[in-house]
Amino acid sequence: MHQILAINPGSTSTKIGLFADETCLLKETLRHSPSEIAPGLDREDQARFRRTALTGFLEERALPPENLDAVVVRGGLLKPLASGTYLVDDRVCEDLVSARYGWHASNLGAIIALPMTREYNIPLYTVDPVTVDEFHELARYSGLKGINRLSMSHALNMKAVARRAAADMGRRYEDINLVVAHLGSGISVSAHRRGKMIDVNNANEEGPFSMERTGTLPAPALARLCFEVGVSLESVLRLITSEGGIYSYLGTKDFAAVEEMVAAGNEEARLVVEAMAYQVAKEIAAMAAALKGDLDRILITGGMANSKLFTGLVRERVSFIAPMTLYPGEEELEALAAGALRVLRGEAKALIY
């Protein structure tokens, strides 16, 4: 039996899970004070604060690190990579610390864990980071030379759900075609052909609008906003990634509150929810076209997959394409542990960055 510690850093917390093979023995969310996560704080210091919280928790629970067979962390913003489980080394940490490809709280995972794993000679892995890139060559074209579409998505959860669905179907992921939609604060809709994610919308830049992201916007209108109003680049990016979507229409980022508005007869809320479902359905149909209509299943995952209202609206529009199956929630710790376990069992080879 293999003991695996999974670590998933967020903006204000660090989620950890201890696994014995596939069995989760415990989960915990370590909350961090504002002084530990202040934006101006050096990244190494942020990692150090979180590392102290992690080791303190392990000591409190009498879980000595030397008993672990592996540690696995959620991957931050790395260079474009094929799907798989990667050994975390100095090159990975250098790119994450320097934010060579961008900064996100998940960059901290490897920085937190590497000193500990080296001290106890434990392998450290990351699985299916957000920059997984298995694009078909046609998917890279944006329509303007010099600007390419980027593969950046909720790859960890979507790949895990795809493998789980294949197992539920009694088939191999490498033998089926799927469209997988992750419905969270951002929405990723992806086309999977024989084990490869050949296309996906970058939830920060395009696709359906979500709780707080605008998705694809009319380009001339956005250009006029920037030049006529004279807003800064930072404010535009903030508008697109955290102040758009349902939040811009209804003033909340809580979908449960939105459902309550709809149930109370709020007509604007009903139309906004239907519009978001409409856009998700259109993106699913687009990904079905990327697969030339040859797909076995549509999978819906993420937090909003728990909503009967929303998933029902999507199902109405896509049921003619393929059967639709729900996998609610985001089991990222489980997906991380499963990726490490495949390597520990010899079912997959650890990839080098």
Image (cartoon, rainbow, N blue to C red):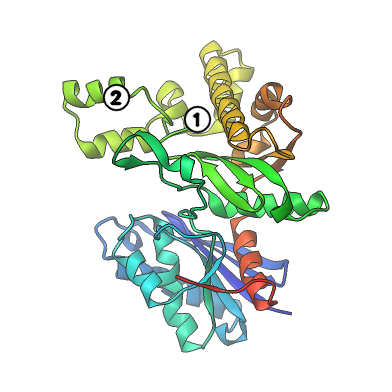
Image quarter of the N terminus: bottom right
Alpha-carbon span between mark 2 and mark 1: 16 Å
Count of residue discs: 2
| Label 1 sits on residue | 208
Residue at horizontal 61 percent and vertical 71 percent from the top: 340
Q: Secondary structure at mark 1?
A: loop
Identify residue type, mark 2.
Leu
Q: Position of residue 272 (x, y in %)?
A: 52, 19
In the picture shown, does residue 64 fall above or below 24? below
In the picture shown, does residue 87 fall above or below 318? below
Residue 222's mark?
2
Residue at horizontal 50 percent and vertical 30 percent from the top: 208
Q: Is residue 261 left or right of residue 186?
A: right
Residue 3's mark?
none
Residue 48 in view here: no
In this rendered view, identify the residue nearer to me: 301 or 116: 301
Q: Position of residue 86 (x, y in %)?
A: 52, 70
Q: Characterize the local packing of mark 2: few (<14), some (14-19) or many (20 or more) Cα atoms within 10 angstroms.
A: few
